[in-house]
């Protein structure tokens, strides 16, 4: 039936699909719509609820 599909062709198609998926995820991650979420996530380590033990603040 389909004689032109061999292992090399399947590997090439798989590589092309992975490249397209990687490019799509990269554009999605670095799009301007995600900036607010990334800024909030970047400040999470500084959002500590516990007071510092060695602090002089009352």
Image (cartoon, helix red, strand yellow):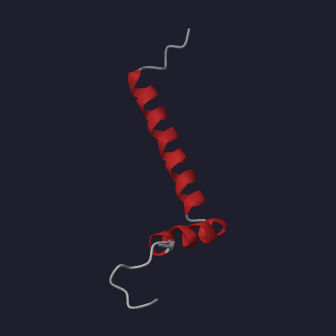
**Residue 53's x, y, as percent?**
35, 79
Outermost top residue: 1
The structure residue drawn at horizontal position 46% and vertical position 75%, both measured from the top left corner, is 46
**Residue 55's x, y, as percent?**
37, 86
Q: Is residue 6 left or right of residue 38?
A: left
Q: Is residue 49 above or below residue 6?
A: below
**Residue 4's x, y, as percent?**
49, 19
The structure residue drawn at horizontal position 44% and vertical position 78%, both measured from the top left corner, is 51
5 or 32: which is nearer to us? 32
The structure residue drawn at horizontal position 47% and vertical position 72%, both measured from the top left corner, is 48
44 or 19: which is nearer to us? 44
Q: Is residue 35 above or below residue 23?
A: below
Q: Quadrant of residue 31?
A: bottom right
Q: Is residue 37 above or below residue 28?
A: below
**Residue 56's x, y, as percent?**
38, 91
Q: Is residue 54 left or right of residue 10?
A: left
Q: Quadrant of residue 30?
A: bottom right
Outermost left residue: 54
From the image, which quarter does the N terminus lie in?
Answer: top right
Q: Is residue 23 above or below residue 48?
A: above
Q: Is residue 58 left or right of residue 27?
A: left
């Amino acid at each position: 039936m389909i004689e032109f599909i061999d292992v090399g062709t399947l590997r090439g198609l798989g590589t092309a699909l992975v490249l397209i998926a990687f490019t799509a995820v990269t554009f999605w991650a670095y799009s301007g719509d995600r900036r607010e979420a990334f800024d909030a996530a970047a400040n999470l380590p500084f959002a500590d609820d516990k007071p510092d033990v060695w602090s002089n603040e009352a």
